Image (spheres, rainbow, N blue to C red):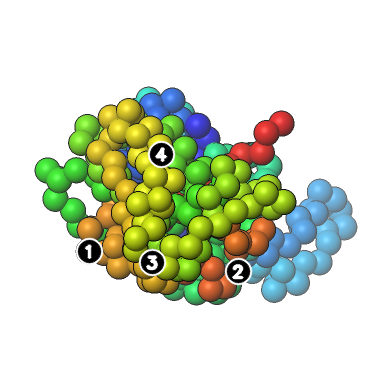
Amino acid sequence: MKILIAHDGSKCADAALEDLKNAGLPKSTEVLVISLADVFVPPPINEVDNTFPMYVPAGVRRAHERAARKLKEAESMAQKASEQIKKSFPGWHVRHEALADSPAWAIIRTAEHWKPDLVVVGAQGHSVLGGRLILGSVSQRVLYEASCSVRIARGHSRDADSPLRLLIGVDNSTYSDAAVKAVLRREWPKDTEVRLLAVVDTVMAITPDPSQRSILKWIEVGDEDNWDEVRQIFQPSADKLRSAGLDAAVMIRRGNPTNELLDEAESWRSDCIFVGPKGTRGIDRLLLGSVSSAVSARAHCSVEVVRAKPIT
């Protein structure tokens, strides 16, 4: 597994590193830690010809000095984060880089080039990584644009003796199915609890492959008398999770999917919410107001938006 981690030295970024311990990540993992210096690097100053030295304005020299200083600070942050990860996961292969670029696009471009399975960012950070999680911030921009899974990591207090609790939003789409498969691929501690949460409104897709629109079928679920049929849709996924040694169950709620996921996560004290980037009625890209983006912005625990890697 390949993981790209953006770190800015903030408390939230450090909490994201601690959160890795609760992510069920495999022992064989390759990690690239990047820290960003949000500075413009001017063209190099050419002083090779000492006979006729080029005049360099003081402003250009100051820009070079500032860029060098910021890059050095970013390098120090990335190195410190990589050392912390190595202590927690001695079997991982970890390296780090410092980049001078716009933070969001640097993360996205690095992900496009390196092709990680997962990008990990903190929910908040210093101004260099966007501050509060709002539209246009680094975390949300990465969530919108990355072609792989993204984990918005949050630290939260939990009893060390209590089991890990994972909440998966399901709607019988290929995207929520990918979220279930992502959990199945991880290595979880014994007694980890998983709840599959289906939020119903009036109808729900029952086609085995909802991407086939020509044969898409729906059932009426406004009446609780039909919820047994809904439960049967997700029972095979729960059975697979139980076969993997997890304590899994299906839950059904009526209401707004975002609110129900957030309320359940808070009341159940979930450690992480797993969701797909869109649902049966979704669109190709995350938009403001979608379940995935709203949950990632408002949850008190970590949120992992799972994108299945394309088959090549």
Q: Residue at x 77, y 67 (%)?
A: 56
Residue 65 occupies quadrant: bottom right
In the picture of the structure, the residue carrying the numbered disc 4 is 237
Q: Nearer the viewer, residue 8 or 110?
A: 110
What's the distance in space between the residues labelled 2 and 1, CA to CA?
Answer: 27 Å
Query: Which amino acid, mark 1?
Result: Ser
Q: Position of residue 265 (x, y in %)?
A: 30, 60
Q: Residue at x 28, y 30 (%)?
A: 245
Is 275 displayed left or right of 194 in the figure? right
What's the distance in space between the residues labelled 2 and 3, CA to CA?
Answer: 30 Å
What's the distance in space between the residues labelled 4 and 1, CA to CA?
Answer: 23 Å
Closer to the N terminus: mark 2 or mark 4?
Answer: 4
| Helix, strand or loop status at disc 2 | loop
| Helix, strand or loop status at disc 3 | loop
What's the distance in space between the residues labelled 3 and 1, CA to CA?
Answer: 25 Å
- CB of mark 2 within 8 Å of CB of mark 3? no
Crowding near pointer 1: few (<14 within 10 Å), some, many (20+)? few
Q: Residue at x 50, y 40 (%)?
A: 3
Query: Which amino acid, mark 2?
Result: Leu
Q: Which mark is residue 103?
A: none
Nearer to us of marks 4 and 3 is 3
Q: Which mark is residue 223?
A: 3
| Helix, strand or loop status at disc 1 | helix
What's the distance in space between the residues labelled 4 and 3, CA to CA?
Answer: 23 Å
Closer to the N terminus: mark 3 or mark 1?
Answer: 3
In the picture of the structure, the residue carrying the numbered disc 2 is 287
In the picture of the structure, the residue carrying the numbered disc 1 is 267
Q: Position of residue 252 (x, y in %)?
A: 34, 58
Is 41 displayed left or right of 192 in the figure? right
